[in-house]
């Protein structure tokens, strides 16, 4: 796999998964309906034509993905905040669609309730709907979800192609020992957004398909044991913002 880097142990928290600073925006349902003004001039469409951001490059769809407790949400939220991008997290979106607060726990059996295949499909549809709003306005976007199989991963690829954008996939991984530690911390955290637990991880592991469906130049693998600042720098080095 492409070059490695990593992130610190951290649970998926509401504050982390829905950035509220001027440098990072989470697209809620109401905001999505209207689009939204970007606060970071580097990602403004001003000065570009169709399918370009400032500086003339294609809009980018950053897809942070991997199994639970791999640190993808912490890193995705940090990247969105750092670059001033809209950000959609599957755990938050799933609960919004169910009429639940992000931190409402739902310890349902795997594949049941809001984690049933149909509801999961609805969640991923909504992620893409929000991404389309940003990309169509020539703005970069950050998605944060598991994207375990080829069929799920092809959908953001196809969306980006259709809109003249570029999909960039950041696959987060770490050791099982780190995953267990993070899940234990998450279980004790009242602000945790994710309902992930060890049996869910094992189910995801069995369902995961190899990443050979993704073009190598559009995939970066990061080992998330390193500090977030190092991981952010690794992304910028791999895909310079000006290119």
Image: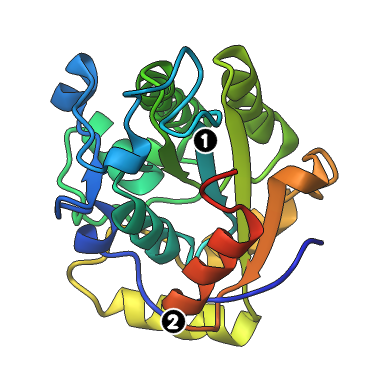
Whether residue 123 is visible, yes or no, is yes
Q: Residue at x 33, y 74 (%)?
A: 186
Question: Residue 23: x and y, percent?
Answer: 22, 52
In the picture of the structure, the residue carrying the numbered disc 1 is 60
Q: Quadrant of the C terminus?
A: top right
Q: CA distance from mark 2 to mark 1?
A: 27 Å
> Depth check: 73 or 232 in front?
232
Question: Residue 166: x and y, percent?
Answer: 61, 31
Question: Residue 105: x and y, percent?
Answer: 25, 57
Tell me if residue 13 comes above or below residue 141 in the rendering: below
> Depth check: 18 or 162 in front?
162
Tell me if residue 229 comes above or below residue 131 in the rendering: below
Quadrant in the rendering for residue 161: top right
Q: Residue furthest right?
A: 212
Mark 2 secondary-structure assignment: loop
Q: Residue at x 19, y 56 (%)?
A: 103
Q: Residue 219 vs residue 234: left or right? A: right
Badge 2: how crowded within 10 Å, few (<14), some, or many (20+)?
many
Quadrant in the rendering for residue 170: bottom right
Mark 1 secondary-structure assignment: strand
Tell me if residue 69 comes above or below residue 218 in the rendering: below
2 or 1: tag closer to the N-terminus: 2
Q: Which mark is residue 9?
A: 2
């Amino acid at each position: 796999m492409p070059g490695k880097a990593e992130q610190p142990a951290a649970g998926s928290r509401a504050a982390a998964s829905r950035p509220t600073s001027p440098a990072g925006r989470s697209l809620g349902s109401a905001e999505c309906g209207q689009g939204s003004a970007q606060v970071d001039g580097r990602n403004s469409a001003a000065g570009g034509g169709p399918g370009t951001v400032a500086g003339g490059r294609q809009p980018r769809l950053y897809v942070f993905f991997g199994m639970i407790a791999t640190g993808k949400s912490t890193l995705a939220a940090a990247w969105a905040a750092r670059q001033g991008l809209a950000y959609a997290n599957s755990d938050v979106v799933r609960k919004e669609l169910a009429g639940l607060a992000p931190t409402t726990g739902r310890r349902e059996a795997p594949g049941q309730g809001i984690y049933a295949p149909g509801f999961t499909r609805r969640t991923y549809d909504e992620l893409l709907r929000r991404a389309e709003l940003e990309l169509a306005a020539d703005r970069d976007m950050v998605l944060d979800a598991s994207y375990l199989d080829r069929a799920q991963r092809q959908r953001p690829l196809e969306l980006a192609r259709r809109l003249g954008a570029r999909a960039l996939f950041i696959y987060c991984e770490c050791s099982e020992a780190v995953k267990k530690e993070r899940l234990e911390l998450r279980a004790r955290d009242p602000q945790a957004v994710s309902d992930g637990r060890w049996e869910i991880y094992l189910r995801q592991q069995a369902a995961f398909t190899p990443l050979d469906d993704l073009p190598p130049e559009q995939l970066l693998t990061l080992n998330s044991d390193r500090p977030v600042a190092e991981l952010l720098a690794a992304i910028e080095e791999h895909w310079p913002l000006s290119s």
